[in-house]
Image (cartoon, rainbow, N blue to C red):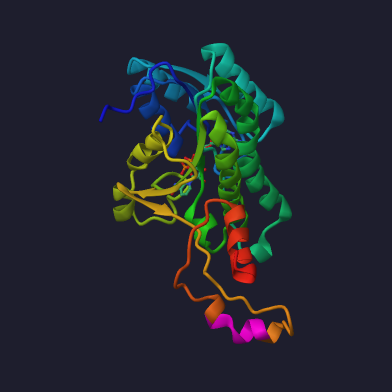
Amino acid sequence: MADIRFDGKVAIVTGAGGGLGRQHALELGRRGAKVVVNDLGAALDGSGGSSAAADQVVAEIKAAGGEAIADGGSVADDAGAANLIKRALDGFGRIDVLIANAGILRDKSFGKMEVADFEAVVDVHLMGTVKPLRAAWGVMREQQYGRVVVTTSSTGLYGNFGQANYGAAKLSLVGLMNTLRIEGERDNIRVNAICPVAATRMTEHVLPPAMAERLKPEYVTPGVVYLASEDAPNGVILTAAAGAFAVARLYETEGAYLGEGGLSAEEVRDNWSRIADPEGQQAYAAGQEQLQTFLRKVMGV
Ligand code: NAI
């Protein structure tokens, strides 16, 4: 099969001044994409900012013979997101790929977490994906082409102590993907999620050094580049770490129809092993499919 190339295509990578996003931007640039490198240049908790980090990555892409422009705005900000999309269109005339990667952390156990720390994290991860994507969506529809990669996390899929805000924000991106996957299909827009683990400033206090050495951010990037390519799947959660890749899915058990007469909480309790039995469980491709399963159980249709 031919190499994956992005010649003539324009890619935006948010939060690309360092860590994972920088690697995604460099690789897309190497493969021929014109890259818009966004990064607010913020501290890990989202405070502060400067366009120096984005400028540096643009210089690296150019030094390798690629084309790139920098954007130092915040993706969580209405004006910042709108400017980012305008900059891409003014600079390069189209938007083929959006990698929504920008992120912050405000870890604390839930009992100690201020609501403001919850909102800040949801703002950057969820709204910082929604705002640029909403602004790019019409462009992608008009082009009849778009590849979108959102960045989720094992904390969103499975939970991690001290990260209720981050987990809620990260799983919300899977919810966003699930519907946009369906809505984008007719306009050749595909939306996927990457679920990475990598040694970056975000993980430097949790990964032992020997493990960090194996978890280079550039080992995640090939998965992201595939999800951003013409042949990308649609609606997939690709997990990636240290060169290992897998797909994560939500499953629903076949469950049990308890009938309408005398239905009670005790019946739910007493049938729990049937309700939760993994035998025959399946991953649905749309909410409608779950409804079909209910109807089949109840009405035999
Ligand atoms: P990082 O902290 O090196 O990169 C995040 C970048 O986003 C920073 O350069 C920061 O300046 C930028 N940023 C923050 N707020 C922004 C805003 N409002 N507008 C524009 N840029 C902003 O961290 P890392 O590890 O590279 O994270 C990249 C993404 O991957 C994040 O979404 C993170 O949640 C996710 N992730 C990372 C994991 C890991 O193991 N490193 C695990 C799971 C998910």
| Residue 40 percent across, percent down from the top left | 57, 31
Q: Using residue 24 as the reference point, say whether residue 275 is left or right of it.
A: right
Q: Residue at x 44, y 20 (%)?
A: 9
Q: Quadrant of the C terminus?
A: bottom right
Tell me the magenta residue range. Answer: 267-273
Q: In the depicted view, which residue is nearer to us: 27 or 292?
A: 292
| Residue 10 percent across, percent down from the top left | 47, 20
Q: Quadrant of residue 124?
A: top right
Q: In the depicted view, which residue is nearer to us: 57 or 277?
A: 277
Q: Is residue 67 above or below residue 17?
A: above
- Does residue 269 appear in the picture of this structure? yes
Looking at this view, name the residue that lies furthest to the left. 1
Q: Is residue 134 magenta?
A: no
- Does residue 99 appear in the picture of this structure? no
Q: Using residue 92 as the reference point, say whether residue 245 is left or right of it.
A: left
Magenta segment, principal secondary structure?
helix
Q: Residue at x 33, y 43 (%)?
A: 216
Q: Quadrant of residue 131?
A: top right
Q: Quadrant of the N terminus?
A: top left
Q: In the depicted view, which residue is nearer to us: 139 or 123?
A: 139
Q: Using residue 134 as the reference point, say whether residue 22 is left or right of it.
A: left
Q: Residue at x 65, y 40 (%)?
A: 127
| Residue 17 percent across, percent down from the top left | 48, 31
Number of numbered discs present? 0
Q: Residue at x 72, y 83 (%)?
A: 264
Q: Is residue 213 above or below residue 34?
A: below
